[in-house]
Image (cartoon, coloured by chain):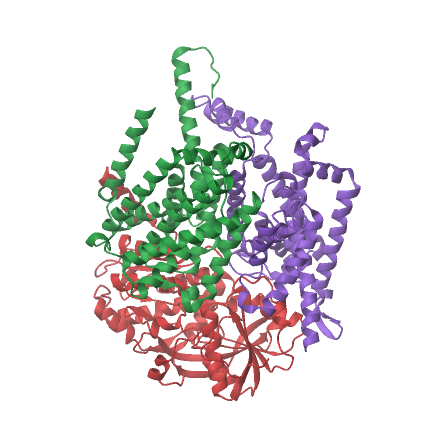
Chain colours: A purple, B green, C red
Amino acid sequence: MQGQFWIIQTLNSVAFGGLLFLLSSGFSLIFGLMRIPNLAHGAFFMLGAYLGYSLLIRGMNFWVAAVVGGLAVGLLGVLIERFIIYPNGRILRAIGRFLDAAIFRPLHVISFDAFWRGLISRFRGLVGNEQGQVLLTLGISFIVADLCLLIWTGDPMTLPAPEALRRPLFVAGYAFPTYRLVVLGIALVAAVGLYLLMERTRLGAMIRAGVDDREMARGCGIPVSRLFTTVFLLGATLAGIGGVLGGPILNAYPGLDTDMLPLALIVVILGGAGSLLGAFVGSFVVGFLYNFGIALVPDLAYFVLFLPMVLVLVFLPQGLFGRVQL
Amino acid sequence: MKRASIISLAIAAAALVAVPWIIGGDFYINMASQVLIYALFALSINLMLGYGGMVSLGHAAYLGVAGYTCILLVTAGYNQLTAAVIAVLFSTAFAGVFGVLSLRAPGLGFIMITLAIGQIVWGIAYRANDLTGGDNGMSFPARPMPFGFDIRDAKSFYYFTLIVFAIAFFFLWRFSRSPFGASLVGTKDQPRRMRMLGHNVWLIQLLTFVLAGFWGSVASILYVYYNLFLSPHALALQQSAEILLMAILGGATSLTGPIVGAAIITLIKNVISTYVERWNTLLGAIFVIAIIFMPYGLVPGCKQLWGWLQNRRKNRTLQHDAPSEPTA
Amino acid sequence: MAMHRRKVLKGLAASGASLAVLKAPYVQAQAGPIRVGFLTIKTGPLASGGLQMEQGLVTFLKERNNMLAGRPVELHTADTAGNPAQARTKTQELVERLNVSVLIGPLAAFEALAIDDYIRSSQTPILTVAGAEDMTQRKSNPWLVRPSCTSAQPSHPVGDYAAKELKLKRVATIADDFAFGWENAAGFQRAFEDAGGKVVQKLFSPLNAPDYGTYIAQFKSNLDGIYTGHAGSNGLKFIKQLREYGSKVQILGGFTPVDESLLQQMGPEALGAITGNWYSAQLDFPINKKFVEAIQRDYKVDPGVYAAETYLCGEVLEHALKEIGGKIEDKPAFMKALKGAKVPNTLRGPVSFDELGNVVGNIYIRKVEKKGDKYVNAVAKTYPNVSQFWTYNKDEFLKNPVYSRDFPPAKNLEN
C-alpha cells in the first residue's frame, strides 16, 4: 500500500505539473517581455474551458476544439492588447473622428474630436504603469468571469475527454487516468516547442532580446510593439488551450479563474519570471508540493503552496531561475 | 489655489456632517458608514501605494488579525476599549513582521509576498476553527459605548465612524505634507539617490508599511463594530484586491482619490447591485474605462479634465473665432 | 432637494427595485401586498445553487399566480454574492428600505450566521435553507424556521442504511474542509458506527482544491465504500476523478454530491451512488410531478435540492398564512403558525417542525440509476419522520458539542 501511495502521488505530481505548465507558460512569457502581470490570465484559462465545452457538445473533435478554443482566447487577448494595453494611437484617434463626425458635430456640441484627443493624449498605454496594469487586468477578469456566468450559467460543466483516453492506464499494477498522462505528454511537447521557438528562431531571439533589455532591442530595430502583440497572442492562446485540455480534469465552473490564477503566480514566482525553464521547473515543483504536501501534512493544506513561496521570495527574491528584475 | 481647497474642504466636511439629515433612512446612513470604513481602508493602503509605490495584495490580513483579536478579547470578558487597543497594537506589531518579510523582494515579488501572507492569514482563520469559528465566523457581542454614547443605531454609529475617519484623514493629510512623507515619495521615485543622500530607504518603507497597517487595523475594528460579525471571507484575496482597486481607481497619488474609489466600489456592490444584475461587469468596465481615460485615477484625471476645460474656455474668450488647439 | 431625492428613490424602488419584482394584478385584496425578501447568491462561485433557488421560488409564485392567502405577493430578490457582509447589507435593505414581512434564504451557513443578530433585533421572520446545525440547536433563533434540513439530517439515515441494508463494514469519508462538510460527514459517521460500521479513514479537502488526485491516492485499498461530503461542483469533480483512477468502490453521500443539477453533467461514474436527501426529482407526489414538469418546461433541467427548497419554503409560507388569514403583519401569530405548521402535502411529502424550528419529515435514500437516456436519483427507501436529532435523545444531543472535524471522535481510524 505504501508503494501505491508513492507511485500514484508521483504520477499525480508530474501530471498536475504538466497542466500547470500549460497554464503558467503564457503568463511567464507575457510578464517576462512586457512586465505586465496579466491578472486576467486565470479568466483566459476559464474562458478557454467554457469555449471548449461549447465546441465539444457540438461534436467537434477534441484536439481541434482545443486549438480553436485557444485561438479564440488568443484573439481576445490581441484585441485587449491592441486597444488598451499598448494602443495604436491611429485607431483611437480614428474612433474620435468618427464619433465626432457622426454624432457630435451634427448636434453642434463642443468639438468632440479635440475633447477626445485631450482625453487620450495622456494615455500612453499601460507599459510602465504598474498600478494601472493591476486595475486593468483585474477589471478585464471581472468582465470575462461575469460574462461566462451569463452565457454558461452557474452550473459546473464537464468536458468529456476523448473516448479512447477514458479508461485508466495500469502503471506498475496501479490504475491511473490515461488522460492525465496525455496532458503531461502535451505539456512536454509544448515545452520543447516553446524552447525551440525561443532558442532557434528569429522570433525567439527577438523576444529574448526584448526580455533582456527592451530599449536596446528597440534601438537595434526590433519592432517591439508588434512583438508585444505576438507574445500576448501566444500567451493568451496557451492559456486558452490549457483551459480546454484541463477541462476534463478540472471542469469548467465559476471560480475556476480565481482558483487557478494564484497557482500560475506561484509557479512564475518560484521559477522566476521571464524564464521558460523557470516556468517549467516551477510547474513541477508546485505539482509535487501540492500533491505530497496535502497528503503528508493535511493540516497545512491551505498553506502548502503559499508558505514555500514566502520562503523562496524572502531568501531568493529572483525566484529559482529569475532573469528578469522582478 | 490654497483658498479654493480650504473652501472645498469645508464644504465637504459640512456635507459629511449633514449626511444623515440629507439622505434620511437608516439604510442609506448605514451605507454612508460603510463607505467611510472602506475609505479608511483605501486611505491606509494608499500610504504604501500612492506615496511609496508599494502594491500590496494582502491588506485584508489586518481585518483578520485585528478583527479576530478584538472579538476574542471582548468575548473573553475584556472591556471594549482595552480589547480595541490591544487588537490594534497587536495588529500593528504584526504589520511590522509582515513588512520586514515583504520588503525582501521588490516589484512583483513584493506583491506576491503580500498576497501569500494575506492568504496564509486567511488559511489560519479558516482552519483554526476552535479559535476563529472557521468559515462560520464569529459574532461580536455588542458595539462599545465610547464615552457613554450608545452607537447602536445608524445615526450615532455614523457620527462615531465620521469622527474616527476625520482623525485618520487629518493624520494622513499631515503625513502627506511632512518631511517623512516627502522622503517616502523620494524612495518611490529615486531610491538610489535617496540612499546616496543618507536616507535609510528600507526603514522609511517599513515605517510606512507599519503606519498603513495601523490605520488598516483601526478600520478593521470599525468594520467589526459595524457588522458585528467576522468570517474568513472578509480576509480573502478578493477583499484585499478590492481595497487595492479602490485606491487605484480613485487615484493613488491624491489624498481624496481613495475615498472616491471606495465610494464608487461600495455603492456599486451594495446599492447598484440591486438594480443591475451584471454589476460585476459594470465594475470591471469602470476599471477598464477609468484606466484608459484617467490612467492615474479618477480624482487626478478629473482635476486635469477640469483644468483643460478651464484653459479651453480661457482660450476661446481670448481668441474669438480663430481655431484653437487644446493646450492640455 | 431631499424630498425630491427620496421621491426618486421611492419611485425607483416601486418601479422595479430588482429584476425579479413580481407585481400581481390589482385584486380586491385585504391589506395590500405581502412583501417577501429573497436572499440568494447570483454571482460568484456559489451562483449555481443560488440561481436554482430563484427558479424554484419563481415557479412556486407563478403557480399561485403571485397570490398567497388572498393577497398579492411582491418578491424582492437580493444578490448576496456569497459574502457575509454583503448579505447583511442586503438584509438591511430588504427589511428597512423595502419593508419585507418575511425573508427566504440565504443559501450559505456563514451568511445566515452573519445576519443572525440582525434578524433577532429587527424581529423579521425568516425561512432559511442554510444547513448550519446550531441555528436550530444550540444557538436557535426564535424568528427562524428551516424547512429544508440541517447539514447532517439526511446523513444519519445514510449511515444507518449503509450499515444495515448494504452491510458495509469499512468506509472512508471525505468532505469539503468547512463547517458544512464537517457536519455532513459527522452525521454519517455517527449513525454508521452506531449501526455497526467502521469509519476507517477521514479526509478533508480544501474548498477550492483544484484536483483530488492526491486524496484519491490516499484511500486505503480495501474499503467497502467512500462517503463524500462535497458540495457543488466539488462533488461532481471528485466522483468523476475517483472513477478515473479505477476505483469501483461504492459511493455514498449526503444531499449534495449527486444532486439533480449535477447529475445531468455526469455519466456512468455516478451509477449506483447511494445518497440521502429529503428530495428527489423522482418523488411520486402529484405536487412534485407538477413541479418537475414546470421546471423542465421553463429551464430544461430536472430540479435539484436548491430549486426544491425554495418551492418548499413557499409551501410552508402559504400554509402558515392560510392559518392566520393572511395577516402576516401579526408577527407573533405568524411565527406560531410557521413553527406549528403541519403540512401534509408538499413536494417532499409531509412536513412539520420541532420546537427549535427545524423540519421533521421524510428522508429518502436514493440510488443513481439510468432511466431512458438520463441518470436519475431513484428512491430506494424512505425513512419517515426524521428530525435533526435522528434517533438520539434531544437533550443529550444538545449537551454534546456541535458536529465538527473532531466531534464525534473517530475511534476506528486506521493508519
Q: Is residue C399 left or right of residue C266?
A: left
Q: Nearer the viewer, residue A297 or A181?
A: A297
Quarter-of-image position of residue A172: bottom right
Residue B84 location (% of width, % of height): 32, 55
Q: Quadrant of the C terminus of chain C?
A: bottom right
The quarter holding residue B135 reads bottom left
What percent of the width, then of the height, locates residue C174? Answer: 54, 73
Task: Name above or below for residue B302 compared with residue C292.
Answer: above
Please, is residue B327 above or below residue B105 in the view?
above
**Does B101 sit left or right of B35 as displayed?**
right
Question: Along the horizontal axis of the image, is B249 left or right of A80?
Answer: left
Q: Nearer the viewer, residue A55 or B165?
A: B165
Quadrant assignment for the N terminus of chain C: top left
Q: How many marks?
A: 0
At which x and y percent is residue B43? 39, 42
- Above or below, C341 against B52 in this view is below
Residue C402 lies, in percent from the top left, at: 40, 75
Q: Residue furthest front?
A: B198
Determine the residue positioned at 23% across, 46% down. B24
Examine the rendering and report whether any part of residue C267 can be seen: no
**Whether residue C317 is visible:** yes
State left or right for residue C97 relative to residue C215: left
Between C240 and C291, the one lying in front of the other is: C240
